[in-house]
Amino acid sequence: MNIAKSWIRDCRSLCVLTGAGVSAESGVPTFRGPDGFWKRRDPMSLATPEAFAADPEEVWEWYRWRREKIRGCEPNAGHLAIAAIERQKTDFLLITQNVDGLHRAAGSRRMVEIHGNIWVVRCTSCRREREDRSRYDVLPPRCGSCGGILRPGVVWFGEALPREAAGAAEEMLRRCEVLVVAGTSALVAPASGYAAVAKRRGARVIEVNPDETPVSELCDAVFRGRSAEVLPALFG
């Protein structure tokens, strides 16, 4: 680990990419794991524009359930370690696939949420967007401005990433000297290709994950462990 720590310590530009595994250690159900199932429904069949158009009430029931699961979760040591290393680097970006808001709660500020945020809602009519942590007794919730149906401010399957967030991520991947990939299965594009992009540009790539992933072979260092344990040691 000492060599990887020196890469991080000595680099000018550091990028961290996180996935569901980081938040799972705080108790957030993983989207693809058995805890992500709701009423025996596969989440991948609900997280689509088509599912929302067909039955917005059912999709919102699932998101209300997810929001309640997340509401009681707190940032773990991995989240806090990422926020701490950010304060030490002049050029830093956290790219997260997680929508739970725990990185921000931990103190991360230079970050992009490429899959959106579950606490944000957007009107399907007037397009206004805001953070709203309401419990929503009536579903689907309605926009207070125009009466349109609100949708969760997340990226569903089949939708493009937010342009600004995606652009910031790609720009950092082109210049970072070290990329730390933590808690992601590396199965969902385009984030699944970020490690390869950074590697081609000459960056050192470090993986933190209990399991082997499709990007493991191209990494310069791999740590098989929980991010809440490995990241504080790696960034300390």
Image (cartoon, helix red, strand yellow):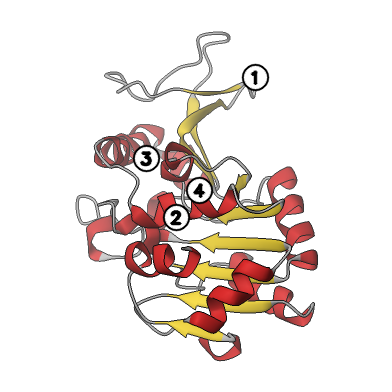
Helix or strand or loop: what does disc 2 sit on? Answer: helix
Relative to the observer, which residue lies in front, 81 or 128? 81
> SS of the residue at dot 3?
helix
222 or 1, which is in the foreground?
A: 1
Pointer 3 local density, CA inside 10 Å: few below 14, some 14–19, many at least 20: many
Q: Residues under labels 3 and 4: Cα distance?
A: 32 Å
Instruction: For marks 2 and 1, give the one nearer the viewer.
Output: 2
Camera-near label (3 vs 4) is: 4
**How would you rate the neighbour count of disc 4 (Cα within 10 Å): few for under 14, some for 14-19, many for 20 or more?**
many
Residue in the image at 44% along x and 22% along y: 132
**Quick check: 56 above or below 178?**
above
- Image x and y of residue 164, in percent: 74, 44
Q: Circle 2 is placed at which residue position?
A: 81
Q: Closer to the N terminus: mark 2 or mark 1?
A: 2
Q: Is residue 201 left or right of residue 72?
A: right
Front disc: 2 or 3: 2
Q: What is the distance, in whole Å, between disc 2 and disc 1 at their CAs?
A: 39 Å
Is residue 222 positioned above or below 187 on the image? below
Read off the residue under disc 3.
Answer: 59
Q: CA distance from mark 2 to mark 3?
A: 34 Å
Q: Which mark is residue 83?
A: 4
* In the displayed structure image, the side of residue 205 where residue 79 appears, left or right: left
Residue that carries the numbered disc 1 in the rendered image:
126
How far apart marks 4 and 2 lie (CA) works out to 5 Å
Q: CA distance from mark 4 to mark 1?
A: 35 Å
Helix, strand or loop for disc 4 = helix
